[in-house]
Amino acid sequence: MTLNYIKRVFTENTGGGSMVDFIELLDGQILGLNDECVVLYESMDAFYECLPIDRQSIDLKAQQ
């Protein structure tokens, strides 16, 4: 199976028992997913910087 947009998928423990799934896209962008939301980051560095930037996201709790 060929993945046209996805480079890799992995999970990290981001501390405090919080697990985040990541989908790295071929263009370097990252989708971060947990049980509360999905957030689009420019890169893994942008995720780790934790800057208070208004990012594209989907609030999964609001979907219930």
Image: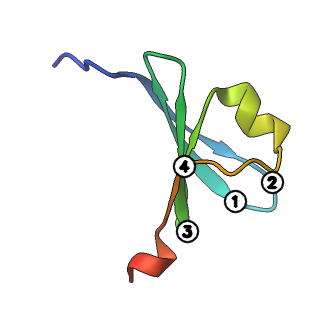
Q: CA distance from mark 2 to mark 4?
A: 23 Å
Residue under label 4, please give it.
56
Instruction: Kindly indicate whether the residue at mark 1 contacts the one at mark 4 (C-beta within 8 angstroms).
Output: no
Which quadrant of the structure image shows residue 45? top right
Q: Earlier in the sequence, mark 3 or mark 2?
A: 2
User: Closer to us: mark 2 or mark 4?
Assistant: 4
User: Closer to us: mark 3 or mark 2?
Assistant: 3
Residue under label 2, please give it.
15
Instruction: Kindly indicate whether the residue at mark 4 contacts the one at mark 2 (C-beta within 8 angstroms).
Output: no
Amino acid under label 3?
Glu
22 vs 16, left or right, is left
Residue under label 3, please give it.
36
Q: CA distance from mark 4 to mark 1?
A: 21 Å
Q: Earlier in the sequence, mark 4 or mark 3?
A: 3
Q: Earlier in the sequence, mark 4 or mark 1?
A: 1
Q: At 25% from the left edge and 20% from the top edge, which residue is drawn? A: 3
Q: Position of residue 24 (x, y in %)?
A: 49, 27
Q: Earlier in the sequence, mark 3 or mark 1?
A: 1
Q: Position of residue 1 (x, y in %)?
A: 16, 19
Q: At 81% from the left edge and 44% from the top edge, which residue is drawn? A: 50
Amino acid under label 2?
Gly
Is the residue marked by circle 2 packed among few (<14), some (14-19), or many (20+) residues within 10 Å? few
46 vs 26, left or right, is right
Number of the label disc, if any, that sits on residue 18 = 1
Is the residue marked by circle 4 packed among few (<14), some (14-19), or many (20+) residues within 10 Å? few
Instruction: Kindly indicate whether the residue at mark 2 contacts the one at mark 1 (C-beta within 8 angstroms).
Output: yes
